[in-house]
Amino acid sequence: MQNNEIGEEHHLEPQNDAKKKYLAFTLCRYLGKIITLPNWTGFNTKLIYKRDIPTQSKIGYLPIIYASPTELSTVKEILNQSEKIADKLNLKYMCLVFDEAIYAKVQQIRWKEEGYLSRFIVRLGDFHMAMPYCGAISKLFKDTGQKDETITLIENLAAKFPCEEYLTEVISEDFEQLRMAVAMFAQSEAEKKPTFALWLNYIEMVQVLLIFLRATGENNWDQHLSAVRSTLP
């Protein structure tokens, strides 16, 4: 995803595939009578085929720095060591991931030194990005107190889980029409009913969190950036 594609008008497109899968999951769990579907994690696990499994990561140990990790001098040494590793691997850019405490200090140093600013892509870990968003959801909602064709489509969908034909159904034109109908209904009801709008907003926020987790598990960078953009005000 390029810089000019992270604006409000562009960033939602990478989420479409995940949203269709979530809608299919919800409808099949609620209306499907043919089989018992697993929970969200099991559902997504069964939909992963060998060709979709991300490349196995190679994990290695970094040099040990015998000092407090939150001291600026220690953080500076982390950046120095990272730069040496990037040079050794012939990497033009290197992505560095930290927790919140160290992330803030890394940025303080990075913004002052052009070499670090242009070389390193500094990010919070996925857990540390997800938790503030969960906190925002909790804060916002802590005080909140064509029928036959649709049923047939959902039952057919559930019957094909977890085979590859299931995903074929999810991306079919019929299911896209169903998704659009659900979205139009939700928008229409939200405009008339404040309570409906409140809970629709809650569902949409939780869906963004699930998209974020899916992107992390599937190593989908565009979808990851899209979900992160959706968590911002």
Image: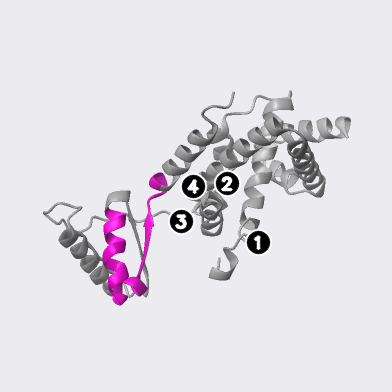
**Distance from label 3 to label 1 (Cα)?**
32 Å
**Distance from label 4 to label 2 (Cα)?**
13 Å
Q: Which residue is mark 1?
A: 9
| Horizontal arrangement in the rendering, residue 14 relative to residue 221 (left or right) | right
- Of marks 4 and 2, the one in the foreground: 4
Seen from the viewer's position, the closer of residues 106 and 35 is 106
Dot 3 or dot 1: first in sequence order is: 1
Dot 4 or dot 1: first in sequence order is: 1
Q: What stretch of residues is rendered in magenta? A: 102-128
132 versus 77 height, above or below: above
- Of marks 4 and 1, the one in the foreground: 1
Amino acid found under the numbered disc labelled 2: Tyr
**Distance from label 3 to label 2 (Cα)?**
13 Å
Q: Which residue is mark 2?
A: 49
The secondary structure type at the circle numbered 4 is helix
Q: Position of residue 183 (x, y in %)?
A: 75, 43
**Is disc 4 surrounded by few (<14), some (14 to 19) or many (20+) residues within 10 Å?**
some
Amino acid found under the numbered disc labelled 4: Gly
The secondary structure type at the circle numbered 3 is loop
- Of marks 3 and 1, the one in the foreground: 1
Dot 3 or dot 2: first in sequence order is: 2
Q: Which residue is mark 3?
A: 55
Let me know if residue 37 is in the magenta part. no
Q: Which residue is mark 4?
A: 217
